[in-house]
Amino acid sequence: MIFEPKAECQDPGERRALQSARLRALVARLADRVPFYAEKLRAAHVLPGDIRGVEDLPRLPITRKTDLRDTYPFGLLAVPRRECVRIHASSGTTGRPTVVAYSAADLELFSTVVARALAMAGAEPGMLLHNAYGYGLFTGGLGLHYGGEKLGMTVVPVSGGMTERQVLLIEDLKPDVLCCTPSYALTLASEFAKRRVRPEDLSLRFALHGAEPWTDGMRAQIDRGLGVRCTNIYGLSEIIGPGVSNECVEARNGSHVMEDHFYPEILDPATMQPVEDGQEGVLVLTTLTKEALPLLRYWTGDITSLTRGPCACGRTLVRMALIKGRTDDMLIIRGVNVYPSQVESVLARCEELAPHYRLVVTREHNLDALEVEAELDAAFAREIVRETLSDEIVEADTQLQALRGRVAHLLHDTIGVSMKVTLLPPGAAPRSEGGKLNRVADQRPRP
Ligand code: DLL
């Protein structure tokens, strides 16, 4: 089902006219209400009346996370703080969180775009939603909650963590739809496997995963492990939270961006110029309709590409590829750019490995070195142990060595840099306990 067919299936030319009108109004409002932007526009020699439409976006200044930090907590608001009805925040890796604020109209927009996302993922009014995103300052829990209610679903506000209770509620309440981080979906799948609950006996049919990068390899594991057809949900607090884009369950071939509200551009990080459709670069988003905290050309740091054209679901909204990583995730290993998601895709091709791993970055003689700790698949490990017990230790060891060599070879061939591969016993790699999972241990000395 399509939640807002008129907007989601609009003729692209008509939509562009709407986006342009909204952009003109936005620039005028920012110049008028937000001193930070008034100053930025002046410095860029742009008068609000100069902007004809989205084709003029490259003339407008970029907004970065540091701008939000520098004006912390409420310096970028375009309405008085008392007109805001909710605050969220995203915890950065260091220092203060980034604080964002919503007017009543913004919350309405938030639940509308999440309702659209849920419908894209296969959800329908009357279905039961098991919401395992964290409630609180994080936008995931409350975002999916109000979106689910808006679509007409029955929402179970479980929040993250306490896996025992999650599993019990899924077995007893029989939800149709699950939402949580992809890494936590794997935790839930292995908990069901431990209890010998077969995926086909679970009530779940659809699942929305996001808030952290994942790959098609992980998607296959989740589909199989939970008996669902899962889709990608993308978003960030600064823009609204979840619901900036979502894959449709029909095609699962790129996430439809709610581009009538959030205008996407892809920029080459070296030249800062827009790239062609299909080319990778950094996603930059402009909020076309937000009231309290509108942002011009926000640099997400997320690497993806855009595709236009007809989609099996009938929507005309532009699609973005799965996020490859963030510019600040990128590791430079002996001159080669490596994203954790590339390593993950390679590991997913080896059936002797589980979808759990850790990357350890160290520095030796001024060169970065990458060690991949890949966890053995439990069934494969059992097989090896059986062989060991039957006095075929040499054989088992040879198998492991061969596997290590094959994985290292595959990584080198695909990514173009050699990495040390260590095999971990089942259960040894970090698991998600509900929130975002950090799979990279950076042990390089701090500059
Ligand atoms: O993670 C919002 C969200 C909640 C999205 C629930 C999806 C589901 P922040 O905490 O502000 O907001 O983190 C935003 O997380 O810039 C990306 O780097 C990453 N991210 C979010 N969704 C995805 C995704 C929420 N589907 C940051 N794939 C973003 C890859 C994602 N990375």
Image (spheres, rainbow, N blue to C red):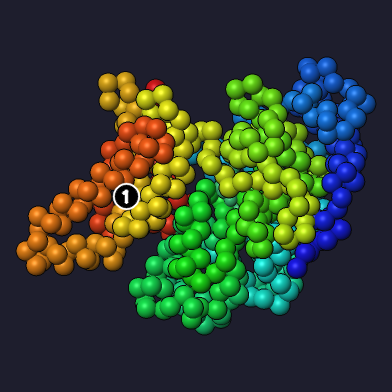
Dividing the picture into quadrants, the one containing residue 91 is: top right
Left or right side of 304 for 387: left
Q: Position of residue 172 (x, y in %)?
A: 52, 82
Query: Could you say whether the residue bearing mark 1 is in a helix, strand or loop?
Result: strand
In this picture, residue 12 sits left or right of residue 164: right
Q: Residue furthest left?
A: 391
Looking at the image, can residue 233 be seen? no
Q: Please give the name of the residue rendered at 54% of the width and 64% of the height, measured from the top-left corner.
A: 132
Find disc 1 in the rendering and name its residue: 374
The percent coordinates of residue 99 (x first, y second) are 64, 42
Quadrant for residue 364, please give it: top left
Q: Residue at x 51, y 66 (%)?
A: 223
Foreground pick, 400 / 56 = 400
Q: Amino acid at mark 1?
A: Ala
| Residue at the image position 88 percent from the left and 43 percent from the top | 13
Quarter of the figure with the N terminus: bottom right
Q: Is residue 155 something one can see in this rendering?
A: yes
Residue 377 sits above or below residue 308 on the image: below
Residue 318 vertical placement versus 71 (above, below): below
Q: Position of residue 237 (x, y in %)?
A: 64, 46
* Image quarter in which the C terminus is found: top left
User: Which residue corresponds to the image point at 58% horizontal and 73% vertical from the top-left?
Assistant: 205
In the foreground, 250 or 241:
250
Number of numbered markers = 1
Q: Is residue 362 left or right of residue 394?
A: right
Residue 14 location (% of width, % of height): 90, 46
- In this view, the residue in front, 212 or 403, is 403
- Left or right of 254 in this view: 81: right
Q: Nearer the viewer, residue 419 or 98?
A: 419
Number of other residues with Cα within 10 Å of mark 1, as a class: few under 14, some 14 to 19, many 20 or more: many
Q: Is mark 1 within 8 Å of ligand 1?
A: no
- In this rendering, the answer to whether 226 lies above or below 138 is below
